[in-house]
Image (cartoon, rainbow, N blue to C red):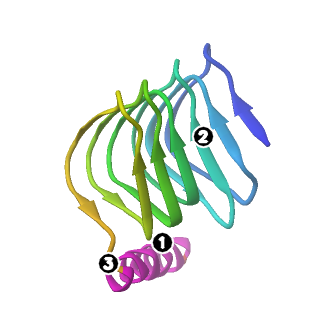
Amino acid sequence: MTNIGPSISIQGELSSSESLRVDGRVTGHILLRDSELTIGQSARVDADVRAVRVLILGTLNGNVTAAERIELGAAANVTGGLSANKVVIVDGAHFTGRVDMDRRTIAAKIAQYKADQVVGAR
């Protein structure tokens, strides 16, 4: 697992095939292929996120698409859309946005994102 510490700030697109924990600040896009993202309590993320599983314990502004599961912990503060087969919002979490648990919509969003990445790489 890779860790982005509390004193680190990243702007742009962050992609990886291994699990990632963010305790710092990320602005832009986060794409984790076949892995898990944890947004720690001290984190501030202003990004659209795609991963297999996403655990949010801190602050996130952006849309989250997960192939399997999204969980908002008790200290989470999230503004944006959540798309996953399973969405868990723990008591105490703050959430403003919409939840989409339709498997076809989620699969279409992931396929579109992958297609955009192939076109962008050319």
**Disc number lying in front (2 or 1):** 2
Q: Residue at x 41, y 38 (%)?
A: 90
Q: Residue at x 56, y 59 (%)?
A: 51
Mark sitting on residue 38: 2
Quadrant of image for the N terminus: top right
Q: Which sits earlier in the primary sequence, circle 1 or circle 3?
A: 3
Question: Which residue occupies the extreme front position in the image?
Answer: 91
Q: Tell which of 104 and 111 is nearer to you.
A: 104
Tell me where residue 116 appears, x and y as whole percent.
Answer: 43, 75
Query: Which residue is under mark 3?
Result: 102
Q: Residue at x 72, y 50 (%)?
A: 19
Residue type for callout 1: Gly
Instruction: Give the overall secondary structure of the magenta segment.
Output: helix
Up-down relation of residue 103 to residue 50 (above or below): below
- Quarter location, residue 79: top left
Mark sitting on residue 120: 1
- The region drawn magenta spans 103-121
Residue type for callout 3: Asp
Q: Residue at x 47, y 54 (%)?
A: 70
Tell me where residue 99 appears, x and y as whole percent.
Answer: 26, 59
Q: Secondary structure at mark 3?
A: loop
Residue type for callout 2: Thr
Q: Which sits earlier in the primary sequence, circle 3 or circle 2?
A: 2
